[in-house]
């Protein structure tokens, strides 16, 4: 039997064991949705890092750096710096004023039903799009990594989907958190080990390593051999719009992270704001180390394995596993591949729980039931059904799209929506007294629509492909794009802010909401009245 | 712009006046001022420092491609410095936040006094 499969089955066995253990603890809503708010700072820090370091990072960023050098590293920088927005502005007020979802804080002093409806729509949009991207990637990888084990794309996608449903439905937030922690530790260990082996390959000489990186040989599609300096920017983001696209990407990354619902819900699992603060610092260490090391993975793959070989053996997403194979043989390849699976599985579980929590808590309990459960345990039951539905829909869409579908834009879309719709409303609800319900609804709607429309008319969807491109990998609309940038943030984020500002100024003042601003400020800054950890 | 749909009565907090009185205390105002004095400049600094990277990389390629140490150029070192700067700001925030915590504790004590006076 295939070694990757054995290691992966071991991961599944351990995580299912945790799920079984957690299912006996998940007896209340605070337990199911927020792990009883008893997760410690380091545990939550590792879990946040785990939720954040998706397969798109491990495989995707390493692959981008292997193929385009420096430009891929630009993602890594933005991914870490983004946590300063989380640390300085969002994490503590969110923990102090909310219960289970991002909408809790937004609806605090506004009319709850319209605000929750829009916030939930935005949450579910971000989570589902992000999840479909991960699932398509997962299925495509499985087909490559488990070659010869008889596992097809359909089986892989369905398997990943069913496992994530099991974690979330039976284990709730406690199981999801521990799955995340185990995966993050595996991922970081694997990355450190692989980077160490890259350095060892160069005789532990950074000079030799960077010299190799500065002269990477490969062949262009038309067969010409080229030598490029992979420390030099500009291999991916080229004129005329490259520089602007890079800037737009940066804006979406550093403002989007603080609006990603599956990251925000993590701060409800800790006892108080101070623990939330320390957990962000833990996460920043792990995330920073991981993303610095992505250059060793990517450049290691470019210099040791070679771009030509990677292109012929699965494409840039296979850079890290192929590097492991070159340095440590089939066993190490199996180990790194198993980590890639674990990563995908943990991230989709995190996305599923944030989407289903938002549906159960925001839509069902607060909008349909006006804030009161009619039957005890109803909110949890609805969340479990929602998790099942979200999972099933994602499996179906991923299978319909197929393994070669071009889905990277869905990740860009998730960050753009988070930055353009969620962040302006989060900021205004904390800092702007006059901010009202119409502003929140308008800001969320404008940010969401602007992101979706600009992605839709941008080069991710609209591009004329060369005749050599396989039909399944073609862009959806074969037409020159109307909007020139892959990343819409530079336009959609200002539009989100503008929507929130105009919505507020053009509608009537809301004296009751402004009255509650003092209360929100006191609670957000002192933790008075915040949700407490559940005692044993 | 969409008008606010059906206004649902929001239950005013039972002790809304207490929240307002806490918000008016000197200790709370000092807490907000202390936070603002750190968070605002720190945020402006990290945003400017961060955007200096894509701007210099995108618009001043000749400058960032200058080699400083063997093949290592300014672009790579500038990118690495972003990690260091982010960690340093996080460290400084955690240190400053100790002061916020003790100010918040003072506010909570004030609240105790307000309630003891029969509010």
Image (cartoon, grey):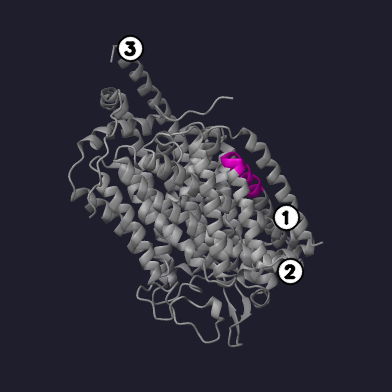
Question: What number is the disc on residue A147?
Answer: 2
Q: Residue at x 51, y 29 (%)?
A: A533
Q: Which residues are magenta?
A: A170-185
Residue holding disc 3: B116
Q: Is residue A407 above or below residue A272?
A: below
Q: Nearer the viewer, residue A98 or A155?
A: A155
- From this viewpoint, is residue A280 visible? no
Q: In front of the other: label 3 or label 1?
A: 1
Please determine if labels 3 and 1 lie on a single subunit.
Answer: no
Q: Secondary structure at mark 1?
A: helix
Crowd band around label 3 with a 10 angstrom C-alpha radius: few (<14), some (14–19), many (20+): few
Image point (43%, 51%), residue name:
A123
Residue at coordinates 60% horizontally, 87% vertically from top-left?
A: A224
For the residues tagged 2 and 3, is the chain the same? no
C-alpha span from label 2 to label 3: 72 Å
What element does badge 3 sit on?
Answer: helix
Q: Position of residue B84 (x, y in %)?
A: 51, 50
Looking at the image, which residue sits at the far top?
Answer: B117
Residue visible at 47% across and 37% down? Answer: B94
CA distance for labels 3 and 1: 60 Å
Image quadrant for the N terminus of chain A?
bottom right
Q: Residues within 10 Å of mark 2 (few under 14, many from 20)?
A: few
Q: Is residue A181 one of those drawn in magenta?
A: yes
Residue B46 spot, x, y in % from top left: 41, 50
Return the residue at label 1.
A8
- Chain at tag 2: A
- Quick check: can you spot residue A366? yes
Q: Chain of mark 3?
A: B
Q: Position of residue A427 (x, y in %)?
A: 34, 46
Is A531 inside the magenta-drawn segment?
no
Q: Which chain does the numbered disc 1 sit on?
A: A
Callout 2 and callout 1 share a chain: yes
């Amino acid at each position: 039997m295939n070694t990757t499969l054995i290691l992966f089955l071991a991961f599944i066995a351990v995580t299912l064991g945790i799920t079984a253990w957690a299912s006996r603890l998940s007896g209340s809503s605070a337990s199911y949705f927020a792990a009883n708010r008893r997760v410690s700072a380091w545990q939550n820090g590792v879990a946040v890092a785990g939720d954040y370091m998706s397969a798109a990072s491990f495989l995707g960023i390493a692959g981008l750096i292997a193929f385009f050098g420096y430009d891929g590293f630009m993602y890594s920088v933005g991914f870490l710096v983004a946590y300063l927005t989380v640390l300085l502005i969002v994490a503590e007020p969110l923990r102090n004023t909310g219960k289970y979802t991002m909408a809790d804080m937004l609806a605090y002093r506004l009319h709850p039903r319209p605000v929750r409806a829009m916030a939930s729509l935005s949450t579910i949009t971000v989570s589902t799009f992000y999840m479909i991207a991960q699932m398509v990637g997962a299925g495509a990888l499985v087909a490559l990594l488990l070659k010869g084990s008889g596992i097809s794309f359909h089986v892989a996608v369905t398997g990943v989907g069913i496992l994530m449903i099991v974690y979330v439905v039976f284990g709730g937030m406690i199981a999801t958190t521990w799955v995340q922690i185990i995966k993050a530790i595996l991922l970081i260990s694997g990355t450190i080990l692989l980077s160490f082996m890259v350095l060892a390959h160069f005789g532990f000489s950074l000079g030799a390593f960077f010299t190799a990186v500065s002269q990477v040989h490969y062949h262009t599609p038309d067969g010409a051999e080229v030598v490029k300096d992979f420390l030099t920017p500009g291999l991916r983001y080229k004129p005329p719009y490259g520089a602007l696209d890079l800037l737009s990407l940066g804006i979406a990354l550093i403002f989007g992270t603080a609006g990603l619902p599956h990251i925000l819900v993590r701060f409800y699992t800790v006892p108080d704001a101070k623990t939330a603060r320390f957990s962000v610092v833990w996460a920043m260490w792990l995330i920073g180390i991981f993303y610095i090391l992505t250059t060793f993975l990517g450049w290691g793959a470019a210099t040791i394995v070679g771009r030509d070989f990677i292109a012929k053996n699965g494409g840039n997403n296979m850079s890290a596993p192929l590097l492991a194979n070159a340095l440590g043989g089939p066993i190490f390849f199996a180990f790194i591949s198993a980590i890639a699976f674990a990563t995908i599985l943990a991230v989709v579980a995190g996305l599923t729980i944030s989407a289903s929590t938002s549906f159960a808590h925001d839509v069902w309990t607060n909008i349909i039931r006006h804030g009161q459960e009619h039957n005890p345990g109803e909110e949890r039951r609805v969340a479990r059904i929602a998790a099942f539905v979200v999972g099933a829909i994602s499996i179906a869409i991923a299978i319909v799209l197929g393994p070669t579908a071009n889905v990277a834009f869905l990740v860009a879309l998730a960050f753009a929506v988070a930055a353009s719709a969620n962040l302006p409303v989060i900021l205004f609800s904390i800092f702007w007294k006059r901010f009202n319900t119409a502003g929140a609804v308008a800001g969320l709607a404008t940010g969401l629509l602007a992101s979706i429309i600009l992605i839709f008319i941008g080069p991710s969807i609209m591009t004329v492909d060369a005749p050599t491109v396989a039909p399944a990998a073609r862009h959806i609309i074969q037409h020159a794009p109307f909007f020139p940038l892959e990343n819409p943030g530079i336009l959609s984020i200002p539009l989100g802010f503008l929507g929130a500002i105009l919505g507020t100024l053009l509608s009537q003042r809301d004296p009751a909401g402004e009255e509650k601003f003092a209360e929100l400020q006191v609670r957000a800054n002192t933790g008075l009245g915040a949700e407490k950890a559940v005692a044993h | 712009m969409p008008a606010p749909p059906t206004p649902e009565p929001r239950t005013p907090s039972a002790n809304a006046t207490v929240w307002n009185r806490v918000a008016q205390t000197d200790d709370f105002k000092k807490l907000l001022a202390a936070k603002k004095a750190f968070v605002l400049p720190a945020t402006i600094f990290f945003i400017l420092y961060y955007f200096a990277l894509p701007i210099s990389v995108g618009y001043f390629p000749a400058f960032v491609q200058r080699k400083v140490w063997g093949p290592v150029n300014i672009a790579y070192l500038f990118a690495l410095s972003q990690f260091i700067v982010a960690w340093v700001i996080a460290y400084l925030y955690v240190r400053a936040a100790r002061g916020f915590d003790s100010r918040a504790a003072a506010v909570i004590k004030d609240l105790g006094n307000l309630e003891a006076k029969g509010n």
